[in-house]
Image (spheres, grey):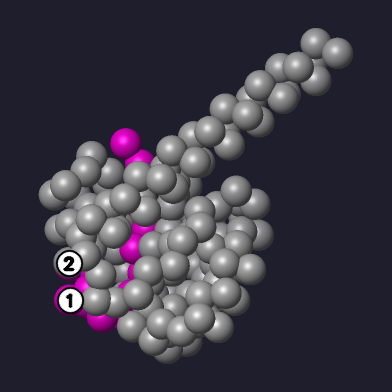
Amino acid sequence: MGHILAVDDELDMLALLKMIIEGYSNHQVTVTNNPMEAAEMLEKEDFDLVLTDLKMPGMDGLELMELAKKRDEDALVIVITAFGSLESAEEAMRKGAFDYITKPFRKEQILLSLDKGIRWREMVRQNKEMKQRLDAKG
């Protein structure tokens, strides 16, 4: 089970994401429509994955992703946007987004991306643990 932070300035979108994720997976979702609050939450809590809108007032999704990555270099961030363009997708991926999804999306897109992300994070975690054990032996 993963702990996911969903950030979008549209309350309807947050309600939809929470309904999809908690209704069709065993992940727990914390939501906020305030990216500044999301930044504070990232400081206080550990999330397995961050789902963020790209365009938000105050702080955009890429800035939020930078904060998440400063706190945890392996932070997984999926960017969702209604303003999809090849340039914004390339920028998001170059800056470290795990995936990029355009609105409107199908519920399967979100669920598949989350599943891949959570499994990726677990694999990275296991690799780090194994490396630490090997380094301790050597």
Image vertical order of residue 132 relative to residue 66, above or below:
above
Q: Which quarter of the image is occupied by the N terminus? A: top left
Chain part drawn in magenta: 1-15
Place of residue 93 in the rendered image (x, y in percent of width and height, measured from the top left): 57, 67
Residue that carries the numbered disc 2 in the rendered image = 16
Q: Are marks 1 and 2 in contact (CB under 8 Å)?
A: yes
Q: Which mark is residue 120?
A: none
- Drawn side of residue 10 relative to residue 79, left or right: left
Q: Residue furthest right?
A: 138
To which quarter of the image does residue 57 belong? bottom left
| Cα distance between the residues tagged 1 and 2 | 6 Å
Place of residue 46 in the rendered image (x, y in percent of width and height, measured from the top left): 47, 47
Q: Residue furthest front?
A: 86
Can residue 40 be seen? Answer: no
- Drawn side of residue 60 relative to residue 94, left or right: left
In the foreground, 9 or 127? 127
**Amino acid of disc 2:** Leu
Q: Residue furthest top?
A: 137
Q: Which quarter of the image is occupied by the C terminus? A: top right
In the foreground, 7 or 40? 7
Residue 5 part of the magenta segment: yes
Residue 22 part of the magenta segment: no
Q: Give SS at disc 2.
A: helix
Place of residue 58 in the rendered image (x, y in percent of width and height, measured from the top left): 47, 87
Determine the residue positioned at 80% across, 11% down.
137
**Amino acid of disc 1:** Asp
Residue that carries the numbered disc 1 in the rendered image = 12
Q: Give SS at disc 1.
A: helix
In the foreground, 14 or 123? 123
